[in-house]
Image (cartoon, rainbow, N blue to C red):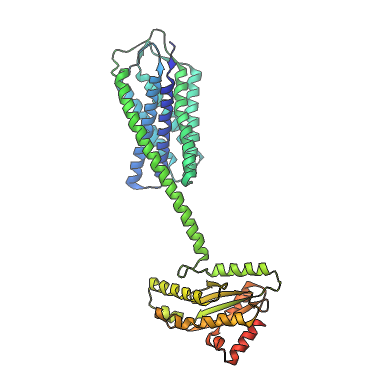
Amino acid sequence: MEGSYDISLVSLSYLVAILASYCALYFGTQLTRVEGNKRRIWLILGSLSMGLGIWSMHFIGMGAYQMDMPMTYDLTMTVVSWIAAVLASGLALFLISKSVAGVGVLILGSLVMGLGIAVMHYLGMAAMRITPSVSYDPFWFTVSIFIAVGASGAALAICRYTQRLVGRQAVGFQGIAALVMGAAICGMHYTGMVAVIYPQGAMPAMSNQLTGSAIGTPIILASVLFIVFSLLAVYSDIKARNNEEEWNRQEAERVKKMAFVDEATGLPNRSRLEHHLLESLVETGGAASPFTLVMLEMSNYRELSAGMNSETLYQRLHTLSEQIQKLIPAGVYLARYSNATFGLVIHDAIDSKAVNQTFGTLGKATTALKVTGWNVNWKAGFSRFPQTGHSSRMLIREALKTAPLAELINDKAPATESGVQMLIN
């Protein structure tokens, strides 16, 4: 007995299979992230989703096959075929969602999923009781089993791989897995239909409870609801993954920024200062392009910060850094080297005027910061490239040899002239 296919229903069956697969893979991915009751709920939803999708696809595909004999089904076998699809889906999802899933588990999951699809199909065919009974071509029957197992294995492998991905990349690979799994379901079904041999003049059993219209309406309703549910799941999954990708991007930027930015002041931190010195040394290349490194130390920082909560401390340090930035000349690179020490790099300071201006304006910070309630005692030290050394480590080490700032900003004191002369020469 020959028949033909309604292409629109065949296309619908593939769409249902894809959506079923995407939902199942979505739930399977979630299973690796949750525990306890929530994990069981996700497993049940994934099993029902996949099972209903396989079952709906089968009967839509059966409806797409048009032949002279009317199709009716035994109610008990139809329900059993749905249960088989749900159980097989649940077991496959459980296996693939294990935290440690090697090749053996993947093979077992492929067998369970593929054989589950095949069992559901052939139980569904058995529900279509006819006289004389149908038979199967051994070759195409075997091919249908291999298609179901092989494609299921590929889809589950992709699903396992997507569990390590985030954002749009994960959505893309999960979509590919759904297409492959959908092909597994449809490929097995329509290959299985090729294997079916309908006897000439066969008629459906009178005891079949489900006629074409009796099973067609519930399947259409279930498929519509399933498609709506699937689309919502797909939308939620894509939205969640995009949000996850954006959060990861922002977090990566924040971590990258924190690696070179002081949290309290927003200034470049020690690592960034050292990197800046290295860049300056590379740029100079030993040529006559000197720069001066100044280390400005709060000698009474420990006493000032004692007993102060972090929020208040951060506020005062931030105010302090803003005041220093306003006082120093343009072009001076400012960083926070340690809790109590700020580093300044004065580029192209070829005479005592620029250095003296910097030290003089820094001295004003003592009075400018009274608004913070701090009475800061400043100490300062300096080094110069190339006179002091040719490495950042040597320049920093020499600049950390600090002395009271007042000795360096008192223009009338001989020590100041001596200090500046040492700095320049």
- Residue at 47 percent of width and 29 percent of height: 184
The percent position of residue 252, horizontal first and vertical second, equals: 49, 56
**Residue extending furthest right?**
287
**Looking at the figure, which quarter contains the N terminus?**
top left
The percent position of residue 230, horizontal first and vertical second, equals: 37, 36
Residue 142 in sight here:
yes
Residue 86 in sight here:
no
- Residue at 33 percent of width and 42 percent of height: 41
The percent position of residue 391, horizontal first and vertical second, equals: 65, 72
Q: On screen, 240 above or below 353?
A: above
Q: Is residue 225 left or right of residue 113?
A: left
Quarter occupied by residue 347: bottom right
Q: Is residue 179 left or right of residue 129?
A: right
Q: Is residue 393 left or right of residue 68?
A: right
Q: On screen, 193 above or below 86?
A: above
- In the image shown, does 364 or 14 lie closer to the viewer? 364
**Residue extending furthest top?**
201
Q: On screen, 36 above or below 313?
A: above
**Looking at the figure, which quarter contains the C terminus?**
bottom right
- Residue at 40 percent of width and 44 percent of height: 30
Total marks placed: 0
Q: On screen, 219 above or below 41?
A: above
Quarter occupied by residue 349: bottom right
The percent position of residue 236, horizontal first and vertical second, equals: 38, 43
